[in-house]
Amino acid sequence: MKDIKQHIENLRKELRQHNYNYYVLDNATISDYEFDIKLKELQELEAKHPEFFDANSPTQRVGGEVTKNFETIVHEHRMYSLDNSYSKEDLLDWEKRIKKIVEGDIQYTCELKYDGASISLTYEEGKLVKAVTRGDGFQGDNVTANIRTIKSVPLQLKGDYPPKFDIRGEIVLPFEGFKKMNEERIEIGEEPYRNPRNTASGSLKLQDSAEVAKRPLECLLYNLTGTNLGVKSQFEGLEKARQWGFKVPHAAKLAQSIDEVFAFIDYWNDERHKLPYETDGVVIKVNSLQQQEELGYTAKAPRWAMAYKFKAEQVSTKLNSITYQVGRTGAITPVANLEPVELAGTTVKRASLHNADQIEKLDVRVGDEVYVEKGGEIIPKILGVDLTKRTVDSKPTEYITQCPECHTALVRQEGEAQHYCPNYNGCKPQIIGRIQHFISRKAMDIEGLGGETVALLVNEGLISNFSDLYELTKDQVIPLERMAEKSADNLIKGIEQSKKIPFERVLYALGIRYVGETVAKKLAKHYKSIDAIAKASEEDLVNVDEIGNKIAESVVAFFSSLENIIIINRLKQFGLLLELSEDELIGQTDKLKGDTVVVTGVFETISRNELKKLIENNGGKVSSSISSKTTYIVAGKNMGPSKKEKAETLGVAIISEYDFLQKIE
């Protein structure tokens, strides 16, 4: 029995190495036939000896597991977005901002930005235990069964890997494989897939992992995440990941200056067309992990990284008409309806014209031949007009003066680019939009209730705001179109379940203008209850980390509305969580209320992120730069001399991590 177990282990080890050679190194050391013979032998042995089952065996790559509902998993480490730049001037500005925060020489790691589906892989003791999609950055879908089928994803690592870590990357579909898939689809009379990126993304959510296994997906990795990783820089992290068995693109380069970054961009701007995958730019990261820590994050993105987008593909087409959409905040968005045209792998029929100023600036008119590109290769936008093709009877576009839905006169505030419909409680698209936002996944995540059903409920007069949802009965919703008994049960059950959604998400769900997920978290953490936020003044609000005048004005205006207060009082009666729970309040104090603290240097007993969390948990505000508003600086080793000099000039106190920890004890 011991010999059989050893033989199984040896076969697994050998097949893993062959997989790695073929799919990662692109250097086969065995024929396909020989590989299949060995794999078959292993399958037969495992079938005879189920006691030696291993989820990470090479035989498990064929899939077969069916996932009906993908479990939502919260990322242990948030998956941030990247800020985009479109010119070298943008990158020079970025470098200036960096140099205001970190001192000394800065190296950059340059990597290609592959266009695929983002993924986070978790490894424990060298084994793949979890694969989660990016989702909204805070949480994503568990697609582990599907990811296991991708041959370039190692199921068992080799070498000196850490006991636990996450690694982030992109699931991509190479052009060659995509072409072959489409040829097969056309042959059987199916519609071909539109583009590799969307097909790769869609593959991750297929219910049958055996179907995923048939697709030639690859996984390109680019970022280690976790603690005690044993690396000091981004570039070293890439090299280590490669040694552990990951497919890390060799295009990555270490740049000693921003000029070397520009050289990398210029080279790949031409050479990218020879790559086997879709790529839409370059990602530039500050190489030193210590400097990355010092730079930290904004609400949405790391300050230490920037994406440079290659010039997007452009086409020209005819503008057939301009229509106007009303958003949930009452904002009016003009939409260009175009003669359908192929652009970057998709058929484009519509493009945003943004606002009246943009229409006037472009002097765009119905009937014009317009130039269209995908802004950031995602949202189509109109760049200009081919005036040589304009007809003599062409008339300038006159922006609408009334709401296209409720015919209320539009308003435009000073300093605002957009027109708004002020009919907050009587304009249907605004009412429907607010309720759709309330039930959305990042907000109340009400299962069984979709956007179309919300529109039906409003149009049938069953609800007029989101608090009405909590009075709906099964008998009221069953007569709705496409609503069966089970669907009605699920809808009512989903509404009831939403009463357990934490306060920060309820606050986001209210749809206060400018209050996104991150701002809602900050406000919930700082004020701890909806009543405290409602009483806060503009002056008080701007003292909260990352809350500016615009957000403060919007929050005060929201709570000044009697209709909004009535809705909130109803939500309280229905039992929604409108304050932090007792568990969430553990470790929260007001000891540092009013303090603005800068964290700098290298610490011995606590990580920089833990320090920042402690400051926020105790009511303080973390700032990245020293100013006259700084209360004090918590400094570790290697504090930069210019920061020290600035602190002394401004008379700002410098304390150690030990002093700080004593302060909040």
Image (cartoon, rainbow, N blue to C red):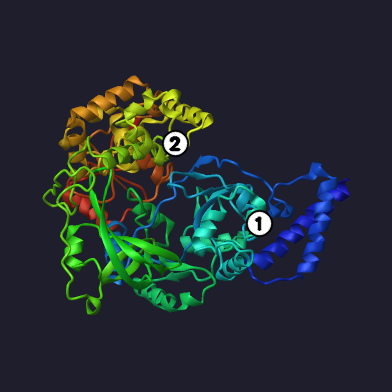
Looking at the rendered structure, the secondary structure element under dot 1 is helix
Residue 103, quarter of picture: bottom left
| Front-most of residues 232 and 546 | 546
| Front-most of residues 560 and 347 | 347
Residue 244, quarter of picture: bottom right
Hey, what amino acid is under mark 1?
Ala
**Tag nearer the camera, 2 or 1:** 2
- Near mark 1 (Cα within 10 A), the count class, few <14, some 14-19 or many ≥20, is many
Is tag 2's residue or tag 1's residue first in the polypeptide sequence? 1
| Front-most of residues 476 and 331 | 476
| Front-most of residues 304 and 43 | 43
Q: Are marks 2 and 1 in contact (CB under 8 Å)?
A: no
**Which dot marks residue 389?**
none
631 vs 291, left or right, is left
58 vs 218, left or right, is right
User: Is residue 316 visible in this depiction of the protein?
Assistant: yes
Question: The N terminus appears in which quarter of the rendering?
Answer: top right
Q: CA distance from mark 2 to mark 1?
A: 38 Å
Q: Residue at x 50, y 64 (%)?
A: 195
Q: Residue at x 44, y 46 (%)?
A: 78
Return the x and y of residue 202 as percentages of the image width and height.
53, 54
**Which dot marks residue 213?**
1
Q: Check the image and name the residue furthest to the top.
A: 573
Residue on which the image places disc 2: 481
Q: Residue at x 30, y 35 (%)?
A: 510
